[in-house]
Amino acid sequence: MPPHGPGFIGALHSHDPEYPDDEWNLYANLDPEMTTALNVERPEAAMGVFKPHARRLEKEPFLESDADEELMVVANFGDSPVHIRKIMVVGGGGDGPADASCHPNKLRCYVNHSDLDFSCIDDYPVAQEFDLVVNGDGSVELLTSLREVR
């Protein structure tokens, strides 16, 4: 019998002793060498925006565009296929209008294209697109139709 039960039932629990109740641990499967951000002030912060559910409201690190209103995060899961069932974009929701204006209003997901950048993004089909609401309290989850992402 596999260590997580038959058919890997229960495989979504955390193995992180700091966050034992964290059931959203897909971030742990990201390849840090291949996960990056484009058009941002701090590209080194790209890995840090993927957080355990228990830390989703921590404001650091964050990504901010250094040129215009668009930025791109390329998340690579290495050789292991994963199924992304939910995405959460947390931010905004403060008292001032600047808080809401700093929150993205759209998310486009592209699947299994490791060579994406702004020069070729229009050559690929969007796997799923979301209109985002300000999610300052981390309560809005986006259900995906994305399957077998690498």
Image (cartoon, rainbow, N blue to C red):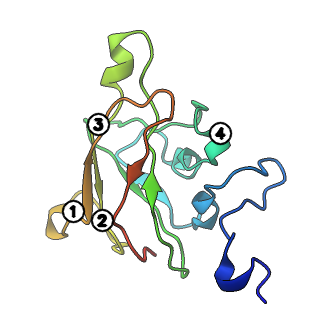
Whole-percent x, y for residue 134 in the image:
36, 29
Which label is found at residue 121? 1
Marked residue nearer the N-terminal end (2 or 4): 4
Q: Residue furthest bottom?
A: 1
Where does label 2 land, which residue?
A: 110
Disc 4 + disc 1, Cβ < 8 Å = no
- CB-based contact (under 8 Å), mark 2 and mark 1: yes
Q: Amino acid type of disc 2?
A: Tyr
Contact between labelled residues 1 and 3, with CB atoms less than 8 Å apart: no
- Residue visible at 54% across and 45% down in the picture: 49
Disc 2 to disc 4, how far (Cα)?
A: 25 Å
Q: Residues within 10 Å of mark 1 (few under 14, many from 20)?
A: some
Residue for badge 3: 67
Residue 55 tag number: 4
| First-in-chain label (4 vs 3) | 4
Q: Amino acid at mark 1?
A: Ile
Q: Earlier in the sequence, mark 3 or mark 1?
A: 3
Give the residue type at disc 3: Ala
Q: Quadrant of the N terminus?
A: bottom right
Identity of the amino acid at label 4?
A: Arg
User: In the depicted view, which residue is nearer to us: 145 or 35?
Assistant: 145
| Label whose residue precedes the other's in the sequence (4 or 1) | 4
> Is 37 located above or below residue 61 in the figure?
below
